[in-house]
Image: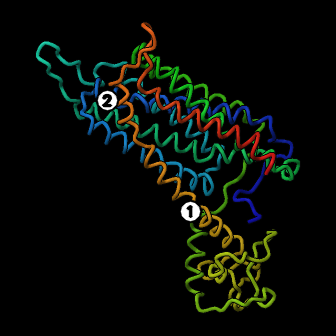
Amino acid sequence: MEQPLLVDYSETQKGGFRTLPFILGSAALMNAATSALTPNMILYLMNEYHMDMTTGSNILYIWSAVTNIAPVVGAFMADSFVGRFQMIGLGSVVTLAGMFLFWLTSVIPQARPPPCVASNNICRSAEMFQLFFLCFSLAIIAIGAGAIKSSSLAFGSDQLKREVYQGNARAMESYFSWYYAVYALSIIVSLTCLVYIQVNMGWALGFGAPVLLMLFSTLLIYLGTPFYVKLKPKSSLITGLFQVIVASYRNRCLRLSSQSADIQYHQKKGSATVLPSEKLRFLNKACIVQDPQQNLSPDGEATDPWRLCTVDQVEELKALLNVVPIWLTGAVMSINISQYSFPVLQANTMDRHIGSGFEIPAASFGIFAVISAILWIVLYDCLILPIA
């Protein structure tokens, strides 16, 4: 697949490594801010909203589901309609608004149930408006963070796609490695410093610090605006993928020849991809021109895009299908590690004191998995890649 999904309209002198501090810094601050909310959330819901473990866990699972599906929708919107920079900017503002609303739940007493009466152990449940305000703020955070995550990594790679960097595969590989390293370091900050503030200095300050981090993240991404390569969105990618599926089914009776010269394929103007790959050959039927006079218009476009697609469209669908096994493998792993509430509740029952004056927050125990991921990233970038 030779053609980029987006069409470049920026000046050639823009982009490059000078833009990465803005992009990586903004992504790190955003991730630190949003990651700081999750670890202690179950304790916040149980202690301040008087929820039982089941109700609180269900809210967190739904929040996690929205957070994970939002980047898929955001990526589609960015590639097809909005553009990656605009999606990141809009997502940053939305996330900041959602985190500010969530912070208000810890500041305004009327936004949550009153404290339990210790004398008779009576705890009032949250009212409908209080639950709505809480869930609304969490939904806004999930939508905004999903918009950022859908485009942040790809937006950084856009800055390294100029001719001077295209032959340097090492630069792109290092960018991806350091992106995830910075991502992991931001989680360490949230699991240590920010979680400690929440536990020892109160919810208001503990949830206020992430709001400030998100504010700095929003300002930082906009500060680099003059230097970014911004790519125009093109027509809907999802529509093009479905067109390939429909066209290959409609042309299922066509026979594929072993000699590519015997078949005429529909090519996109300006595309360097001449022939479809041999993998998943049944999809190649979607781009076979049966009758040029009937299938093609005078300007070379398909008269019916649901019966004839370009080679690029076919290769885009193949590329997507190739990563499905990786997605499924990651999905199984994510199911196992997405149990946010139970490890924190279990750690909360432990004796976590180190000496007489310091107690490790229960939510900080997740740092061991993050440290392991960072070590593997450094090992991959510094040892495995050079000898590969």
Is residue 200 left or right of 368 when viewed as pictured?
A: left
Q: Residue at x 63, y 55 (%)?
A: 79
Residue 178: % across, % down:
70, 38
- On residue 45, the disc is 2
**Amino acid type for the residue under numbered disc 2:** Leu
Is residue 280 left or right of 42 when viewed as pictured?
A: right
Of labels 2 and 1, the one closer to you: 1
How many marks on residues? 2
Q: Could you say whether the residue bearing mark 1 is in a helix, strand or loop?
A: helix
User: How far is disc 2 from disc 1 in space, using C-alphas?
Assistant: 36 Å
- Pick the residue in front: 342 or 27: 342
Which residue is tagged 1?
324
Residue 386: % across, % down:
81, 45
Quadrant containing the N terminus is bottom right
Q: Residue at x 71, y 32 (%)?
A: 22
- Pick the residue in front: 21 or 224: 21
Residue 283: % across, % down:
63, 79
Q: Is residue 254 above or below residue 182?
A: below
**Amino acid type for the residue under numbered disc 1:** Val
Q: Is residue 174 above or below residue 265?
A: above
Q: Could you say whether the residue bearing mark 2 is in a helix, strand or loop?
A: helix
Is residue 162 left or right of 339 when viewed as pictured?
A: right
Quarter of the view holding residue 86: top right
Q: Is residue 341 above or below residue 230?
A: above
Q: How many residues crowd mark 2 within 10 Å: few (<14), some (14–19), many (20+)?
A: many
- Pick the residue in front: 370 or 297: 370
- On residue 241, the disc is none
Residue occupying the far left of the picture: 120
- The mark nearer the N terminus, 2 or 1, is 2
Q: How many residues crowd mark 1 within 10 Å: few (<14), some (14–19), many (20+)?
A: few
Residue occupying the far right of the picture: 164
